[in-house]
Amino acid sequence: MPNSSLKMRPLFISLLALVFIVLPTVTQADDKTPKYTVEEIMKALHKGDDSVGKKVLNGKGTQADFDKLVEYYTSLPLNDAPQGDPAGWKQKTTAVLNAAQALKDGKPGALAQYTKAVSCKDCHSVYRPQD
């Protein structure tokens, strides 16, 4: 019987190595898939006068609001640009995410950074398809 367990050892080691090689690749692929669409993000954060985005812009955001911003905005740069330059989209949406993260982390000047980053007109005029 001990002889058969020695024969199984290379198979076990090979399977274990395969798991450590494949698992990070699968996880990385999931990191590139947005959890939310652009439309879902805009509705969740910016729709209505009592939206999280407006609340934060008015200086009344809570830690829970900042957490929600980061949760949703994390998907923003992972989405394709609805129209316009993809590189510009990536730059703009990453700036929005970074500003939300600064709010969440309590960094000085974060509200001004967020206010500048979420200029609706600046983004919509370039990336939002005309209805």
Image (cartoon, rainbow, N blue to C red):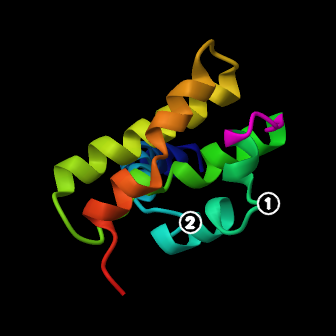
- In x, y percent, where is residue 13? 43, 42
Residue at 45% from the left image edge and 58% from the top image edge: 30
Name the amino acid type tagged 2: Met
Residue 50's tag is 1
Which range of residues does the magenta coloring cover? 57-62
Name the amino acid type tagged 1: Asp
Mark 1 / mark 2, whichever is N-terminal: 2
In magenta stretch: residue 80? no
Q: Is residue 83 left or right of residue 21?
A: left
Find numbered disc 2 in the image and state the secondary structure of the residue it sits on. Answer: helix
Q: So how many labels did they put on this image?
A: 2
Q: Is residue 12 left or right of residue 130?
A: right
| Front position among marks 1 and 2 | 1
Residue 118 appears in the rendering = yes
Q: Badge 2 is on which residue?
A: 42
Residue at 47% from the left image edge and 68% from the top image edge: 38
**Callout 2: few (<14), some (14-19), or many (20+) C-alpha neighbours within 10 Å?**
some
Residue 85's tag is none
With respect to residue 131, does 74 lie above or below?
A: above
In space, the residues marked 1 and 2 are separated at their CA atoms by 13 Å
- In x, y percent, where is residue 42? 56, 65
Residue 26 appears in the rendering = no
- Tell me the chief SS of the magenta region: loop
- In x, y percent, where is residue 128? 34, 70
With respect to residue 21, does 84 lie above or below?
A: below
Q: Residue furthest top?
A: 108
In the foreground, 118 or 10: 118
In magenta stretch: residue 60? yes
- In x, y percent, where is residue 130? 31, 81
